[in-house]
Amino acid sequence: MTTWRKEAPSYHFAMPCGIIPRPGMEKPMIRLCAPDELAEGHSRGFLIDRDTLFAVRKDGQVFVYRNRCPHRGIPLDGVPDQFFDDSGSLIQCAAHGALFLIESGECVAGPCAGQSLSALPCTETADGIWITPWAQA
């Protein structure tokens, strides 16, 4: 069950009422936000239980990853909701500058080159951006 946590006020909380079974789905899904709350070329962090995630939108498609650098296991963002490099074309670790492809999460530069971010499958509907909790893409 999703819980409210006070120690990470910079993240957007996925609402507890967001966990609902979707028709035809075996597992419940969690609603991260409304589609219009994640604009094209932007990123947004979320806290679900003790897990921090982030979503990015590129070319109309949403990608969701765990907010954890594969090199050190630390959060990627140094500033809330800021996960991109200066060009806005790559995800960047604020701690040591590793760069990751948005579409795959693969590290293309930095100490974890060749490793990847942990992706979560997501679905976008008119009602929201949804993830299946604890699943791997």
Image (cartoon, rainbow, N blue to C red):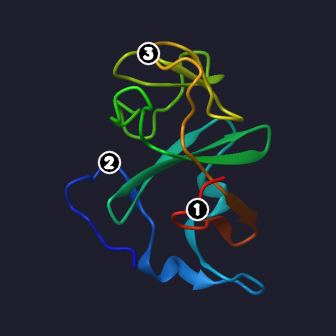
Three-letter amino acid code of the residue under disc 3: Gly
User: Dot 1: few (<14), some (14–19), or many (≥20) neighbours within 10 Å?
Assistant: few
Vertical placement of 5 versus 19: above or below?
A: above
Q: Image point 53% across, 67% down: which residue? A: 133
Q: CA distance from mark 3 to mark 2?
A: 21 Å
Three-letter amino acid code of the residue under disc 2: Ser
User: Dot 2: few (<14), some (14–19), or many (≥20) neighbours within 10 Å?
Assistant: few
Three-letter amino acid code of the residue under disc 1: Ala
Image position, residue 72 (x, y; %): 34, 28
Which is more N-terminal, label 2 or label 3? 2
Disc ID at residue 97: 3
Residue bearing mark 1? 135
Q: CA distance from mark 2 to mark 1?
A: 24 Å
Which is more N-terminal, label 1 or label 2? 2
Q: CA distance from mark 1 to mark 3?
A: 27 Å
Image position, residue 55 (x, y; %): 57, 47
Q: Kindly indicate the quadrant of the structure image that contains residue 91.
A: top right
Image position, residue 36 (x, y; %): 66, 56
- In the image, 103: left or right of 54? right
Q: Kindly indicate the quadrant of the structure image that contains residue 107.
A: top right
User: Dot 3: few (<14), some (14–19), or many (≥20) neighbours within 10 Å?
Assistant: some
Vertical placement of 109 versus 27: above or below?
A: above
Mark count: 3
Image position, residue 112 (x, y; %): 48, 20
**Callout 2 secondary element:** loop
Q: Image point 47% across, 83% down: which residue? A: 17
Q: Image point 54% across, 37% down: which residue? A: 117
Disc ID at residue 10: 2
Q: Nearer the viewer, residue 23 or 113?
A: 113
Which is more N-terminal, label 3 or label 1? 3
- In the image, 21: left or right of 83? right
Q: Image point 44% across, 15% down: which residue? A: 97
